[in-house]
């Protein structure tokens, strides 16, 4: 009866709010936002904590008012709200369109499409998204209101992000607390915790209202190779820490260790072996020595290579895996399923392990936040606890050997799960030498300027992972093309991948090796004419394009790595190289570069190495980065001239060599690089 009454009251509250307040178009900030196509006039999140059926819930109402100013601003407009029945129940969704002439039209849940929230690798999920595409003309204002009831307050930490791709006139987070209830909050900006106390309004009854507000926030700047907007924008999250229902006081999780213990309790019943799993483990380890590391590596490889990644998430399936027996039977599962199956197999083999939750990142790790289950992890892996060390193992990563850590997990905060509760740990970042790519290009050039030969490849760590993935999962022309793209070479056609070793990863540090037959798809030049060679003739520069002007967000450099390219060019008797450029070495706080040309019998050789020592640098280092990139491009632009000669006839005097480069380590910024910059493939 109490639950029914709560639902009726919620429905009445939603109905009472169905009337819209008057809107004054004269209040629009016409001249304040320059050429912005859209302006967010209001982004308001109201969190009302209350009790439903003797359980604490959070009713989160989001009210957004957006002004679509220009023809481009009204392109692809979609409004909506996500929900998941039983965990995030949809209470209300409605909106209105205010046309430029002041005429209003409304829409509600019945006008929207109810769509799956996930696609791709997710085979099925009960997470839904209610979406509506209103018909707009330039100058229209769209206002939406949605309410979602979040259940199980150990899961969630409602939040508000106070910036986005469009200017924000007013952003607000309001939290309503009944008497005796309490929350903690976390404020972040640019990925770092900040101090931001709320305004407090207290009622005589003991109820409290907390308000965070920010006004006049400019749009985030779109920048290449930068952290995601949600990682950089100012944000406030709240967690319910205490609630009183029926006179009984309950405290929420206070530390990540409590989440560790709770998740362990939720997942442990699924990590139970049966006879089929025991028999499979015995068969897998039949020829493996007693060494725990060797046995763990074999079990890891089995799950990695035999269980396909497919996600099925229903209800709590976002956090609880399927039973290990089921995953083994069907041969597929998501990260939780693969990690739990590996943990179950390790237990059968007598090797202790812990399940681990982590936020897999794209170059900018997301620090662990408030101690809740949701919002701190998007991936699950395993700590294999060997006698001398713990090994982080990700069986979803097909190109990774046991003992190697994918870059998406390096530098990340991880939470191991245990019955007693474990604290958060941080994964180390590999040094550059652990992620090394060696590419040696051997070409024989004919008198007509066409060349063919072979590439020898050796790669370890994160530089080997994508190459292995393509070799294992691609076939034919697509396999050759993607393999070629990862080598950072120009104008080369892969005829065949002739020889490989280490494709199926076994032990950390064992390189992937390959011999690839290639030909150039452009000739060096016509017979009888002077040919000119630069490093850019063969390789992409390996430095990332950065926009001109000030920088607002960090620059993501990728995994610390060594990219070493060599060229051995066999020339026809009719060709002789001119004077070779002097060696160049360039150093920056975050990278080093070396370039050497050498005379060889019957040809020339080129040796080029670029080493990145950090995964990212701050926005304040953008000029140093541009100077480093400029210096590399100048060094790469110095040409070696190949002159035509007649065998047996004395050569004419050599032409002057190309102009010497400026200092390879400039002391002051030199502006934006003027040559082509490409991503480090």
Image: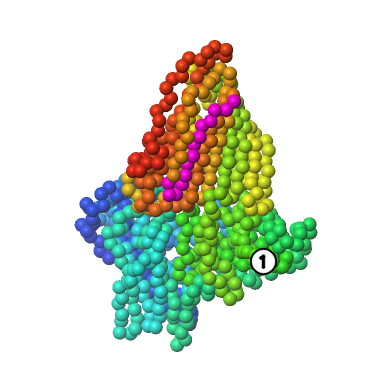
Query: Which of 602 and 67 lies nearest the eye of the viewer?
Result: 602
Q: Nearer the viewer, residue 109 or 118?
A: 118
Q: Quadrant of residue 601?
A: top right
Residues packed near mark 1 inside 10 Å, few (<14), some (14 to 19) or many (20 plus): few
Q: Is residue 664 above or below residue 194?
A: above
Q: Is residue 238 left or right of residue 531?
A: left
Q: Position of residue 63 (x, y in %)?
A: 35, 64
Residue at the image position 49 percent from the left and 36 percent from the top: 595
Q: Is residue 595 magenta?
A: yes
Look at the image and tell me whether residue 145 can be seen: no
Residue found at the far top of this picture: 649
Q: Is residue 490 left or right of residue 676?
A: right
Image point 53% across, 48% down: which residue?
561
- Label 1, on which residue? 387
Report the number of numbered marks.
1
Q: Nearest the camera: 271 or 16?
A: 271
Provide the residue span drawn in magenta.
588-601
Whole-percent x and y of residue 304?
Answer: 65, 55
Does the magenta stretch mainly form a helix, a strand or a loop? strand
Name the residue at the left extreme: 26
**Residue 669 picture location, percent across and down:** 34, 43
- Element under disc 1: loop
């Amino acid at each position: 009866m109490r639950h029914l009454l709560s639902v009726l009251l919620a429905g009445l509250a939603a109905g009472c709010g169905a009337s819209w307040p008057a809107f004054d178009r004269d209040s629009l900030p016409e001249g304040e936002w320059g050429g912005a196509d859209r302006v967010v006039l209001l982004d308001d999140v109201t969190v009302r904590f209350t009790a439903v059926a003797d359980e604490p819930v959070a009713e989160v109402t989001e009210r957004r008012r957006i002004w679509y100013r220009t023809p481009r601003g009204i392109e692809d407009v979609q409004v909506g709200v996500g929900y998941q029945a039983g965990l995030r129940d949809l209470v209300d969704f409605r909106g209105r369109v205010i046309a430029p002439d002041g005429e209003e039209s409304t829409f509600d849940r019945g006008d929207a499409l109810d769509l799956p929230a996930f696609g791709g690798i997710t085979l099925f999920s009960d997470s839904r998204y209610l979406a509506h595409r209103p018909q707009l003309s330039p100058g229209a204002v769209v206002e939406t209101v949605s309410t979602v009831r979040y259940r199980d307050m150990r899961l969630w930490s409602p939040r508000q992000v106070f910036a986005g791709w469009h200017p924000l006139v007013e952003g607000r987070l309001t939290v309503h607390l009944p008497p005796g209830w309490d929350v903690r909050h976390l404020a972040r900006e640019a990925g770092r915790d900040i101090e931001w106390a709320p305004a407090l309004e207290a009622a005589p009854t003991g109820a409290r209202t907390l308000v965070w507000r920010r006004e006049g926030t400019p749009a985030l700047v779109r920048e290449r190779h930068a952290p995601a907007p949600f990682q950089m924008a100012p944000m406030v999250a709240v967690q319910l820490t205490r609630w009183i229902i029926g006179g009984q006081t309950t405290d929420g999780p206070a530390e990540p260790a409590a989440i560790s213990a709770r998740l362990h309790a939720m997942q442990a019943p699924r990590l139970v072996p049966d006879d089929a799993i025991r028999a499979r483990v015995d068969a897998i380890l039949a020829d493996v020595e007693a060494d725990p590391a060797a046995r763990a590596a074999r079990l890891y490889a089995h799950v990695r290579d035999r269980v396909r990644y497919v996600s099925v998430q229903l209800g709590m399936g976002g956090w609880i895996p399927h039973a290990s027996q089921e995953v083994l039977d069907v041969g597929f599962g998501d990260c939780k399923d693969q990690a739990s199956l590996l943990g179950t197999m390790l237990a059968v083999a007598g090797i202790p392990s812990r399940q681990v939750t982590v936020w897999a990142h794209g170059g900018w790790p997301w620090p662990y936040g408030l101690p809740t289950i949701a919002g701190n992890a998007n991936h699950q892996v395993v700590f294999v606890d060997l006698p001398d060390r713990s090994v982080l193992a990700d069986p979803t990563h097909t190109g990774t050997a046991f003992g190697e850590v994918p870059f998406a997990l390096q530098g990340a905060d991880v939470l191991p799960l245990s019955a007693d509760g474990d604290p958060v740990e941080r994964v180390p970042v590999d040094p550059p030498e652990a992620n090394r790519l060696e590419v040696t290009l051997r070409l024989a050039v004919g008198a007509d300027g066409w060349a063919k030969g072979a590439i020898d490849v050796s790669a370890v760590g994160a530089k080997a992972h994508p190459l292995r993935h393509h070799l294992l999962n691609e076939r034919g022309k697509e396999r050759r093309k993607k393999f070629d793209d990862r080598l950072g070479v120009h104008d080369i056609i892969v005829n065949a991948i002739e020889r490989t070793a280490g494709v199926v990863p076994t032990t950390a540090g064992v390189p992937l090796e390959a011999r690839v037959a290639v030909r150039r798809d452009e000739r060096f030049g016509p017979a009888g004419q002077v040919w000119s060679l630069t490093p850019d003739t063969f390789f992409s520069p390996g430095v990332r394009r950065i926009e001109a002007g000030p920088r607002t967000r960090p620059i993501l450099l990728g995994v610390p790595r060594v990219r070493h390219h060599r060229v051995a060019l066999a020339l026809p008797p009719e060709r002789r190289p001119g004077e070779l450029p002097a060696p160049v070495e360039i150093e920056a706080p975050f990278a080093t570069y070396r370039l050497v040309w050498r005379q060889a019998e019957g040809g020339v050789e080129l040796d080029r190495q670029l080493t990145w020592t950090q995964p990212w640098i701050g926005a304040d280092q953008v000029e140093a980065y541009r100077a480093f990139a400029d210096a590399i491009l100048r060094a790469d632009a110095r040409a070696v001239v190949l002159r035509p000669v007649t065998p047996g006839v004395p050569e004419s005097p050599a032409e002057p060599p190309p102009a010497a480069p400026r200092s390879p380590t400039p002391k002051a910024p030199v502006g934006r690089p003027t040559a082509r910059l490409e991503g480090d493939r």
